[in-house]
Amino acid sequence: ALAGSSPQERTFIMIKPDGVHRGLVADIIKRFEAKGYKLVGIKVLVPSKDLAGKHYAEHEGKPFYPGLVNFLSSGAVVAMVWEGKEVIKTGRTFIGATNPLASAPGTIRGDYGIDVGRNIIHGSDSVDSAQKEIALWFKPAELAEYELISKKWVY
Ligand code: RTP
Ligand code: MG
């Protein structure tokens, strides 16, 4: 139960334009918040094609890449940084499989999605990609340094 024995990590979570348009922002935030994770950064923006392209640079050259970049930059997204023990892995578990039809009920994509190109939310898949994505989407001053008062009841 000691905070010192629970190393904290950060992940980049983004509600994509379909999730925003469908009114899923509060539901998604609620899941991370209720789990006990700490919100350290959040903003709404319409990403430029340049930013969307950089975010998905690992997929450059794949057939779905141009459509993916166009889709992400087609509307408002909610970009967030969440902090806590194993939040990268847990975030991916919350989100579900890439294809919503293959995602278990109870996951965000499993509960709300059908199409792989309209899968509602993004989450970093490793410590390395989390660091890169946080640096791409947020300035250091946009991340809040504070102690979550509930921490000693969560850990
Ligand atoms: P994300 O990066 O958005 O969190 O999704 P992911 O890790 O679950 O999946 P990834 O392989 O990184 O793919 C990024 C996004 O590209 C779209 N995609 N389409 N076969 C296809 O048409 C296909 N494969 C992937 C999805 O929207 C996926 O979220
Ligand atoms: Mg991915």
Image: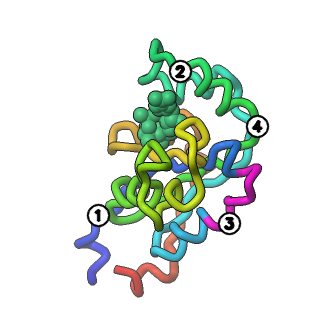
Crowding at label 4, few (<14), some or many (≥20) Cα neighbours within 10 Å?
some
Assign a secondary structure to mark 4.
loop
Pick whichever, 48 or 41, lies toward us.
48
Outermost residue, top direction?
61
The CA span between labels 1 and 3 is 27 Å
**Magenta span: chief secondary structure:** helix
The residue at 69%/45% (across/down) is 18
Q: Quadrant of residue 153?
A: bottom left
Q: Mark 2 points at which residue?
A: 65
The disc, 3 or 4, on the residue closer to the chain's N-terminal end is 3
Q: Is mark 2 on a helix, strand or loop?
A: helix
| Viewer-nearest of discs 3 and 2 | 2
Image position, residue 103 (x, y; %) = 43, 54
Numbered tag placed on residue 92 in the rendering: none
Q: Which residue is drawn at 54% across and 24% down?
A: 54
What residue is shown with label 1? 7
